[in-house]
Image (spheres, rainbow, N blue to C red):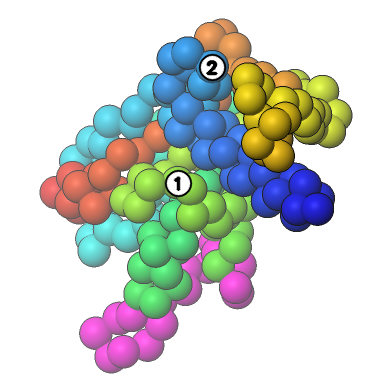
Amino acid sequence: MFAAEIGAFLTTNVQLEVDRQIALGDGTGNTLTGLLASISAYVPVASAIQDASIYDLIPVVKTAITTVGGSKYNPDIVIMNPSDILKYKLKKDQNDNYVLPPFVSKDGTVIDNVLVIESAIMTADTLVIGDRRFARIYEMPGMEITKGFVNTQFTEDEMTLKIRKRLAFLIRGADAGGFRKVVGIDAALVTLAS
């Protein structure tokens, strides 16, 4: 009787696991090679940016991508943890006025023409910026739920449910330059300000 309820529970948890693996998967075993494992880290450079913030970091990393990649890449997304988004949205000046640079949308969801995507799966103090045209998810539609009896389950009125989702995530090695990750946002801001 509970098969439908358990199936819905499994479906939700598989979707959460798919999201987790696309972001954080390390490529071992049956795990996808996710976004963070597919791209290189941005190495901050001392830039003497006064009171550097995430508002500054995103255009700086975007410029680092386009400087190396030329006109091939146009970084258009940044993926961040909600706690990091909150940090820049609540940034205030010395008079307790909210800081909103002229290159940021009123709600803070677009910074220098880069769409901010909130993801609780992304580790706090980490962000990824890149050109989404060069990241692909290949998947077979739907999920496959199978039911069966293993060993003595039939006589014990038990059943095994298995759910399967088939997909792959790909950023080609030739296009990994269209993305950068910043692991340690706070440390990067200190370096940019020096």
What amino acid type is highlighted by mark number 2?
Asn
The label shown at residue 30 is: 2
Across and down, in percent, residue 55 comes to 42, 59
Q: Residues within 10 Å of mark 1 (few under 14, many from 20)?
A: some
- Tell me if residue 106 is in the magenta stretch: yes
Q: Residue at x 31, y 39 (%)?
A: 183
Spatial CA span between label 1 and label 2? 20 Å
- In percent of width and height, residue 39 lies at 45, 23
Using a 10 Å C-alpha cutoff, classify the residue at mark 2 as few (fewer than 14 neighbours), some (14 to 19) or many (20 or more).
few
4 displayed left or right of 96: right
Residue under label 1, please give it: 122
Tell me if 138 is positioned left or right of 172 in this view.
Answer: right
Instruction: Read off the magenta span.
Output: 92-107
Dot 2 falls on a residue whose secondary structure is loop
Which residue is most to the left?
194
Please say whether residue 164 is visible from this viewpoint. Answer: no
The answer to if 46 sits in the magenta stretch is no
| Disc 1 residue type (three-letter) | Met
Residue 138 horizontal/vertical position (percent): 75, 21
